[in-house]
Amino acid sequence: MKQVVIRTMSGITKINKAMVWVIGTLIAFVSILLFFDVLMRYFFNAPTVWAFDLSTWSTGIIAFGLGGYALAMGHHVRVDVFFENYSRKQKSVVDLVGMALLFVMAVTLIWVGMDYVIHYYQVGAMSSGGMEMPLWIQWLIVPIGGALIGLQGLVRSINNIHIIVTGEDLYNAEEGR
Amino acid sequence: MDIGVIAIILFGSLFLFLFLGVQVSFAMGGISIIMGLIFWDGFSSLDGFVLGSYEHATQSILTALPLYIFMAAVLMYSDLAEDMYEVIYRWFGGIRGGLAAGTSVVSAVFASMVGVVSVATAALGMVARPSMLKRGYDDKLTLGVIMAGGVLGVLIPPSIVMIVYASESGESAGALFMAGILPGILAAILFIIYSLVLCFIKPEKGPNIEVGHRFTWAEKFWSLKGIILPAVVIFLVLGSIYLGVATPTEAGAVGAAGALFAAGTRKKLNMENIKSIFLMTARLSGMIFWILIGAVAYARIVAVTGVGDWLAGMITETGFNRWIILILILLFFLILGMFIDTVAVLLITAPLFLPVLTALDFNMIWFGILFCIAVCIGNLTPPFGVSLFIMKGVAGDLNIRSIYAAVWPFIFLLLLLLIIIILIPEIALLLPALMMD
Amino acid sequence: DEAAEEAEEETYTLTYHSSYPPSEYEWEPKYQAQERFMELVEERTDGRVTFDVYYSDQLFGQDESADALARGTIDIQNTSPSYWVERIPEGAIASLPYWNMGEEHTRHLLRETEVGALYEEALEDYGVKPLTFWSSSTTGYMSTSPIAEVEDMEGMVMNIVSNLTIDFNQSMGSGVASLPAAEQYEGLLRGTIDAMQFPYYTLDTYNFVEVVDYLSVPTLNPALGMVAISESTWEELPEDIQAIMQETALEMEKDAMEGSQRYTREIFDLAEEEGTEFVPMSEEEFDELEQISQEKIWRNFASMNERTEEMVETLLVENEKWIEENPEADNYMDQYLD
Ligand code: NA
Ligand code: NA
């Protein structure tokens, strides 16, 4: 049982850590394409029509898609004026409060976001930024991003509870064990 | 429920959670959703959160954010940034605080072009801090100079904040741009003077190179080859904006592509560096966007519960002397700017404040500049400010207390600037007047 | 009876969310559509209806406001049909070049013909109900080099707001860009873009007059705004309040027409004072441009769905009818031609 839980926690963390490669590649790719678009406009008066859509869509993917990674690595900023003096268990308790607030956000993004994906699919909404891309595809990252960070929050919560009960890490996502 | 009670719950809960040590993003986002469920029509407020988050994350000016962060990461991990600082050091290292002054100039120029505070602070924090620390500079001075330089983009044109103010007030964006130039330069000069004086008095804050160890002219000129590639990247970014080849947003892509090219030329694009570049970009982008998602939700709740209006109404209804009202309004921006984005404060309060200020016969271009300085300060004031949180994300090794301590001198310098512009409006109004002739 | 009495005592606070800042002048059309509308409704319902107003899209973006309205997160939205075309493509009718002949005709098409009925149907399918259509001056090309004929478009970078115009611009040899409104000022100033098609009142409200050198006349179409209410909110209101709101909304629609015409005069005066040059067209050149726009933009619009196809067919018929009934309308564009 314990091993299954740890393996699940590790699996979720690995997915979020893999997002670095997915999104890093995306950013590099978008930089080069937008640079190309600028050149085409300035020198040939022939900008691409999809540059605007591509850049806003990819920014959505970057924004929502990296929340889980930042959480796995403990990079979400906190005011640590008092926090740094807490004991390990106290820190875990406060972190659980943070995870509860995160779940409120994540569940909302998953539930309402998915609702919009379905809605845009049904009405056939199309982006007007030049790409003729269905809006539901652009919106998919909202529930996916919510799920990525929500699941990572679950991993963190389980570990926090384990720390509160036993004083030990069960699975520390930052260190990957 | 009484609006005063709502205000106390809204601000009190944020204070509580943040000081407890809850992550900034989750505290702001979670509180906003819960408050929305209670005070804004129940479940339909959830649509407000999701629609607003998506709109904010995909708004076109923020597409610049990951691009500039990526550019800065490439410059950093291919040692291009370091080479550039080596040049500044060889040339100006003889002066105590010379690198801090140089960073102020670099920050002001870069921030002014990029114009989005979060972007400038993240990029400069990554590039400038390691190089300054390596040369013995005090971390407190380093952090302060970077954060302060990063906000100047609001004041030095082009500025999105000014465009928003222009459309709210009906004033000319062009005149506001002109009006911001001298106060912006004055701010940068104040930062430079502070750094130089501080390091003169306390040499350990920003040591100069000892006389016997100074670089020869040959070494100075030889070092210039190190600046060629980074200079090309910087020229690409600033030049493409200035010459109208690219918008400030697109220039992020130009800079990133240029940095990739430069790093490739230096043969620095190995797997290890690419991994570091991706990790840095992902970490900062993820963290900043989620803070922004939380912050925009919180600003919406302040608006929709009527708390913002209520507070603003208390000022406009006092019937005090016009100067007292002006100062109260600026104080209001400064205080509310501690909690939420000051541009959001402007949108919430503009319908109340702007007609009052116009009726009191204040010059609204001048007030626009005062507002922009208030925006700069609001980003920097502890305990909450986007610049502070981003700096904390960049300098993950530090606690927030050191960041708070670092920023105070610069807040006072900006307050000094605010007072100077209030007393001598000509500093702001000279250039717009010349432009009109 | 008691129930009716209770309904009469019930008060309603409606959230009025606007894409625009508060109005500057009392004569401008937007003032009728937002401030004066709210004032009159509050007055005429004896305070049973009050408004909670948010300007400048404070709560959501202009595009997303369609969903917020449809789901009842807000009650009323003042916006432009063009902001909602991703979700309600029929609204692109208002962006078709030369689709009508002035404010009267816009109102006629939207209120008295099948064209407007079809658009209203589309809005209602989405869960929103239009209250007021308000023209606000006119839309046209604003540029940094003159556009007097089709050939002038060659080599220009045109900032567009609609996908429908991509091949239209490309066929004339201009490149298209999609800078957001906040970047257009800088874009024209630095030459990132050379021209844009946008409402002329933004010469004043966004101060574009400072960076625009040429105004092309003939204009493309009236700038159209719209106040819409959430269907779910509407259904909750008692009939007498519905009647008051609808009546007031239509009254504002008529009052706004005069303001729209005045806005055009004021804007043209402003442009002239600031040294912006007016560029008229010859009749032949205008006819050519009109024809290309119909072949490209109108056709693209018609091919979006069955309803837009029907809208274009009806529009062509209705425009002919309008000229038959109002012979002077045929001269509508003459004021702008060489
Ligand atoms: Na700027
Ligand atoms: Na602050």
Image (spheres, grey):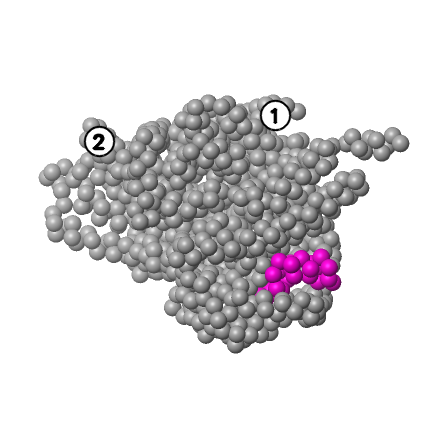
Is C330 or C182 nearer to us in this picture? C330
Is B104 or B73 nearer to us in this picture? B104
**Residue type beneath disc 2:** Val
Task: Please tell me in which quadrant of the rendered image residue B397 appears.
Answer: top left
Residue at the spot of label 2: B197
Is C324 or A27 nearer to us in this picture? C324
What separation in Å lies between label 1 and label 2 (alpha carbons)? 48 Å
* For residue B8, above or below residue C131: above
Residue B204, given in percent of the width and then of the height, sits at: 22, 30
Q: Looking at the picture, do discs 1 and 2 lie on one chain?
A: yes
* For residue B318, above or below residue C48: above
Chain identifier of the residue bearing label 2 in the image: B
Chain identifier of the residue bearing label 1 in the image: B
Mark 2 neighbour density, 10 Å: few (under 14) some (14–19) many (20 or more): few
Is A118 or B246 nearer to us in this picture? B246
What span is colored magenta in the figure?
C91-116
Q: Give the side of residue C89 with respect to residue B227, left or right.
A: right
**Residue type beneath disc 1:** Ile
Residue at the spot of label 1: B3
Count of marks, rendered view: 2
